[in-house]
Amino acid sequence: MTLEYFKTSEALTMGVELELQLVSLSDFNLTASSPDLLHLLERKPFPGTVMPEIAESMIEIATGIHTNYANLLSQLQNIRNTLVHAADKLNIGICGGGTHPFQNWSEQKIFSKPRFREVSALYGYLAKQFTIFGQHVHIGCVSGDDAMFLLHALNRHIPHFIALSASSPFVQGRDTLFNSARLNSVFAFPLSGRAPFTLHWDTFVQEYFYKMTHTGIVKSMKDFYWDIRPKPEYGTIELRVCDTPLSIEKAAALACYLQALCKYLLERKELPPVEDDYLVYNYNRFQACRFGLEGSIVHPKTYETLSLREDILTTLRKITPYAESLGSFDALEYLTTTLHEGSDAHYLRKQFNERGSSEGIVDAALRKFRSSKH
């Protein structure tokens, strides 16, 4: 398949990918157990897809294609239950969270796979420092032009997803004072950030992608670590800014928020995206990473300063009819509760204050992943 071809997908279908931590139950540090876990999981059918990630202390799971919250959540619960059962046999733990609170990056082992070895050779120590954990959400698009429109129309909502999913306040045993420190590691890569501005697929391919391949810098879309990127082989856009939440319930809710938001944006009731929208993009992104739900952002059209929490609440109310039509109203209810109770980063800091140790943070994350409670 060449990049000129953008596979047509059913509009607004969705799929979720989660990068998960593998933890030793003896010291709560990361453990290089993915080869053993993957071997064990191969023995019987898996209710989704499970694959290695760049470090042996992590795995990635992926759902199938879904249209509503209930079915997506059900598959994620089945995946979670299967993983926990297998991990128990190996005496290891599995949890979410965008970073492990005290692992040492230099101790990580690169998984033996050609692409991972190539990335490690190219990026040096950054590859091991990339032992971070994110949620990716795919949304189906009927055309490449719709994909490029959504990719840029979502620019002002990127801080919403960063703040709602934030679960990486601790790095190397210290509180970073960020709610999502994970994205600082992503930003270290030269092909990170945001996609070049164009609203047409053919223009993107001819005037950007092929020029980049001719430079020898990139070979495929996988070489871009953008906050949102098109996935022509799937017929989707892929949101990549979310930390892996501590619960699969939140992971499902975030995906459905994106789905409903895309349905609303595709009606094109708002002013279309323009290049100047990105004047405030990095500032807004920083506010969400640093302060989470307590941050403030600048509206790219009006330049008005907004409370991030209030902006999310306003958006949730605006898109409620769209979520209801998609069968995902419960997802918005879940996120509304998050806005009132606080993010996973808030929860992890609270656990540290109560338990008094980084190991206690990991133990709390392990328990939260196993539980189906809100």
Image (spheres, rainbow, N blue to C red):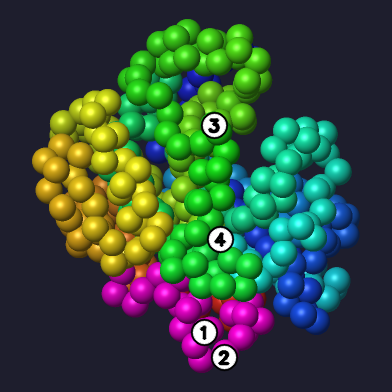
For residue 10, say whether it is visible.
no
* Residue 345 highlighted magenta (yes or no): yes
Nearer-the-camera pick, 115 or 88: 115
> Sequence-wise, which precedes: disc 4 or disc 1?
4
SS at circle 4: loop
Question: Residue 9 has which mark?
Answer: none
Alpha-carbon distance for marks 4 and 1? 16 Å
Q: Nearer the viewer, residue 33 or 361?
A: 361
Question: What is the three-letter code of the residue carrying label 4?
Answer: Gly
Q: Nearer the viewer, residue 367 or 276?
A: 276
* Quadrant of the drawing holding the N terminus: top right
Q: Which residue is mark 1?
A: 351
Q: Is residue 323 visible?
A: yes
Q: CA distance from mark 4 to mark 3?
A: 20 Å
Amino acid on which disc 2 is placed? Arg
Disc ID at residue 191: 3
At horizontal 57% and vertical 38% (from top left) the residue drawn is: 189
Quote the CA–CA distance across marks 1 and 3: 35 Å
Residue nearer the viewer, 159 or 62: 159
Helix, strand or loop status at disc 1: helix
Answer few, some or many: residues within 10 Å of disc 2's Cα (few below 14, many 20 plus, some between 14 and 19): some
Whether 223 is drawn above or below 145: the answer is below
Q: Secondary structure at mark 3?
A: loop
Q: Point out residue 53 in the picture as x, y percentages from the top left corner.
A: 72, 48
Tell me the amino acid under the disc marked 1.
Answer: Gln
Residue 165 position, x and y percent, is: 44, 60
Q: Which residues are magenta?
A: 339-363
Circles 1 and 3, Cβ within 8 Å, touching? The answer is no
Residue picked out by circle 2 = 355
Task: Please tell me which of labels 4 and 2 falls first in the chain.
Answer: 4
Circle 4 is placed at which residue position? 98
Q: Amino acid at mark 3?
A: Leu
